Image (tube, rainbow, N blue to C red):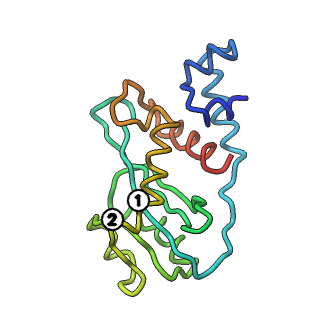
Amino acid sequence: MVTILLKEGCGIRSISRILLISKNTVLSRILKISSKIRRPLFFNLGCKFEVDELWTFIGNKNKMTWVTYAIERETRGVIDFFVGTKSKKNIKPLMDKVLALQPTRIYTDRLNIYPPLIPKEIHRVFNYCTNIIERKNLTLRTHIKRLSRRTICYTRKQEYLEAHLKIYFWG
């Protein structure tokens, strides 16, 4: 029930009120559920991928953090994601997972972190070629309150955000 309410855009306190349980119980259930979820294995080689990032806050409105993730264009499935600062060192493991799938193309925005991480032959930077992942960003912001741009909701701990994203993407 918690997973359904999370996917429908309910916040922690809303779920707490609906299920008549404490918010700490909701948070512990989210962590427990997400610990059982494994990233799905993706075996299709030679696909096209899109990589993008969106920002949110952890702890308070002064601690901005980034959610970077990759999707396969045809199935729109999330390959993997990373929560943290936007740096080459942090994004490299995500890009290595995508590159291990021998992509024919990887589409990104104009962020200067990507060119050193992606071979020139397969990297494309076009505004219109990241439409799928940009649409997914809007859907994420709509369904997960803590990712909204103008909100009073934010994540208190990074592990809760990662758990919520695991449930949303693969649960």
Left or right of 119 on screen, residue 76:
right
Where is 135 relative to 92, above or below?
Answer: above
Name the residue type under label 2. Answer: Asp
Where is 166 relative to 121, above or below?
Answer: above
- For label 2, the residue is 109
Where is 74 relative to 104, above or below?
Answer: above
Asked whether 31 or 3 is in front, the reply is 3
Where is 152 relative to 133, above or below?
Answer: above
Separation of residues labelled 2 and 1 (CA atoms)? 7 Å
Residue that lies at the very extreme toward the front in this rendered image: 128
Name the residue type under label 1. Answer: Asp
Residue 46: where, in percent of width, then height?
A: 58, 82
- Callout 2 touching callout 1 (CB < 8 Å): yes
Q: Tell me the element at label 2.
A: loop
Asked whether 14 or 28 is in front, the reply is 14
Left or right of 24 on screen, residue 146:
left
Left or right of 79 on screen, residue 131:
left
**Residue at the image point whose x is 51% and y is 39% from the top:** 161
Q: In which quarter of the image is residue 58?
A: top left
